Image (cartoon, rainbow, N blue to C red):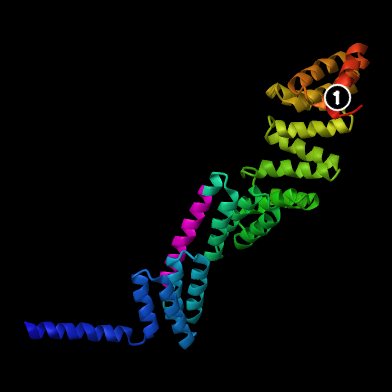
Amino acid sequence: MRKLGMALLLALFAGFLLFTACEQPAITSAKVYIDSNELDRALEQCEVALTNNPSDPDAHFVMGKVYEKQKNYLQMNEAFTRSLEISSKYSNEIQQKRNTHWTNHLNQGVGLYQQGKSAEAAEKFLIATRIMPEKGVAFRYLGLAYLDAEQPEKALESFRKAYEIDPMDLEAYFMIGRSYFELKDYKSTADQMKSFIEKADESHQFFSEALYYLGLAYNLLDEPDEAIRVYKDYLVSDPDNTAIKFNLGAIYLKREQWEDALEMFSAVYESDPQDFQSCQSIGQAYLGMEKWADAVRYLEKAADLQPDNAGVWFWLGTAYARNNQLEKAKAAFDKNKELSGGE
């Protein structure tokens, strides 16, 4: 029994020697240090191994595992990449690790994003893009986080990368236009939204929003005819959209198309009688139509909604004066001066 035991032990030892025969002693030491959680020493041994042989895939792989333990995922990824460049020996294990850490960072980022912690979410998404740069979805999420963090230039770069990786990702394509809008590049916004509308089906979740931003961009580019055309097209598919109606009303008001403006603002106000801006705009439209009493009625309501708004008192004073309510007109103009700091 003793001889048999000794023979078995010798066989196992010989197997171990055979298994580690091609492995540098420093790598063997690094693995021992990893097991005992002495990560700094493990890293030192990996560096010794790489000094001896910079093209050793084992050394790069084990170094990646050390960084993984330290949660230095970017350095982990670099070490794994270098190992794969030399040999495919650890390709399956590296792919598995990358998938795991990519998924973890993406999910952590989504959780932080949903909590409104955009800057922290961006850090997680950024690491995910470094771990697996071939996956576009992390770049899209990174762009969304940057947009929320008011970093539109970085958002634009991220969305472009997401679409470059996956040309079927129309959400990223739409968000390129949103980034241009936040950058106040309205010409590029209009061009991008037009392109998106051509690519997307009307059932796409961002189709209506693309029409909205296209109209808004045309309006800001002082192309009201194009804006009106786009907004009207939008209202065909979404006739109850008050944001579109308000924007359309604002264009009509500026063009002194009083009745058209009144129709749009009235629809907005009916949906929300506490909406100050639509209430004041109805009063302004009635002023343009020379319906002084109606103007007074709505501008008084607007003043009740926002009594500290200097502008509404100016318009109310104008309506009072036109309606021959001169004492009230003087009081309204005095209130305007008081709130605006005039003398």
Instruction: Read off the residue under disc 1.
Output: 338
The residue positioned 53% from the left and 48% from the top of the image is 112
How crowded pointer 1 is (Cα within 10 Å; few <14, some 14-19, many 20+) is rated as: few
The residue type indicated by label 1 comes to: Glu
**Where is 288 relative to 14, above or below?**
above
Which residue is more in the foreground, 86 or 24? 24
**Where is 139 relative to 241, above or below?**
below
The residue positioned 85% from the left and 18% from the top of the image is 295
Instruction: Tell me the magenta residue range.
Output: 92-111
The residue positioned 76% from the left and 35% from the top of the image is 232
Q: Is residue 195 left or right of residue 332?
A: left
The residue positioned 78% from the left and 25% from the top of the image is 308
Asked whether residue 319 appears in the rendered view, the answer is yes
Magenta stretch: helix, strand or loop mostly: helix
Q: Is residue 99 magenta?
A: yes
Asked whether residue 200 appears in the rendered view, the answer is no
Q: Quadrant of the C terminus?
A: top right
Q: Position of residue 218 (x, y in %)?
A: 81, 44
Q: Position of residue 115 (x, y in %)?
A: 54, 44
Q: Is residue 8 left or right of residue 231?
A: left
